[in-house]
Amino acid sequence: SAAETRRFYTTPDVAMFTDKNLDRRFLAINIGTGYRAHPLDDSAADRFYSIRDPHVFNSMTQGQYNTYDIIEDDDLIDVAGVADTLIPADGDGWKLVLPDGQKVLSTSRTFNDSVFFVTFEATVDSADPCRAGQSLNRLYRVDVSNGNPIVPYGESVPPDGPEADDARITRLEQGGIAPQPIFLFPSPVDENCTGQECAPPPVACVGVECFDPEYPNNPVRTLWTQSGVE
């Protein structure tokens, strides 16, 4: 059906993380669906996926790969409307079923165990239904391990339902198709200062809209050299 015809136009965002509930490392393969070639097409029920690969440090033979089943949509846990999801040890990952009309048209980015991605929702000019309106862009920030909303330190976890979904979202001001999130690491004002206290905190931006990604420790400037190389 048209609702099940989801298209991938973006590059997978691959990141290593530790599931603290399982005390085990995984690779997360994060990607969202959306018909970028036809952004006004709302026929598909689009989603954001995070698939787990448990083979982080060991290589596999082709024979071992052949023993694994293909991961399908139904194998992933739907976290929409849920504020505190636990992925079991044998789980394949999670998915976030997006509200009608929302789609992912740019690549996600994982930073400090949080996945940042933008959804696009077209609005139609009432005077001309074939003409796109300003559109709506929403920035999602979720936990890479389970899709939970990121709760600031000291705040309580929202209840399941619409509040859990709202806690994942920041509405952006820009129209059109917003670009992917990027993360900037400003240089220290004093180039001779190399300690952690000298480094400005990172900044995240979606286009011209910038925000604090809430990185708890300022980055440390590190220099290295390699001997024996001319």
Image (cartoon, rainbow, N blue to C red):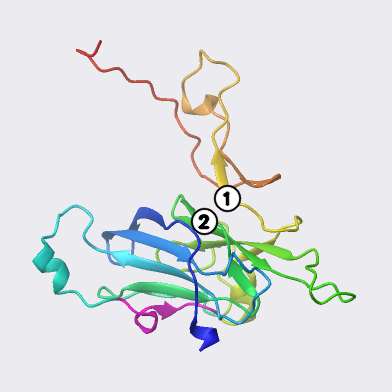
Mark 2 or mark 1, which is nearer the start of the sequence?
A: 2
Task: Tell me if residue 146 can be seen.
Answer: no
Mark 1, residue position: 181
Q: Quadrant of residue 198?
A: top right
Q: Is residue 160 above or below residue 185?
A: below
The residue positioned 45% from the left and 74% from the top of the image is 95
Residue nearest the viewer, comparing 22 with 174: 174
Magenta-drawn segment: 71-80
The residue positioned 9% from the left and 67% from the top of the image is 63
The residue positioned 50% from the left and 35% from the top of the image is 218
Q: Can you tell which of label 1 and label 2 is closer to the viewer?
A: 2
- Give the farthest residue toward the bottom: 1
Mark 2, residue position: 107
- Give the farthest residue toward the right: 127
- Indicate left or right for 127 with 100 as reference: right
Inspect the magenta stretch and tell me whether residue 73 lies in it: yes
Residue nearest the viewer, comparing 57 with 34: 34
- Indicate left or right for 129 with 37 as reference: right
How crowded pointer 1 is (Cα within 10 Å; few <14, some 14-19, many 20+) is rated as many
- Location of the C terminus by quadrant is top left
On the image, the x and y values in percent for residue 174 come to 75, 55
Which mark, by number, is residue 139? none
The residue positioned 63% from the left and 69% from the top of the image is 38
On the image, the x and y values in percent for residue 132 come to 78, 68
Label 1 to label 2, Cα distance in Å? Answer: 8 Å
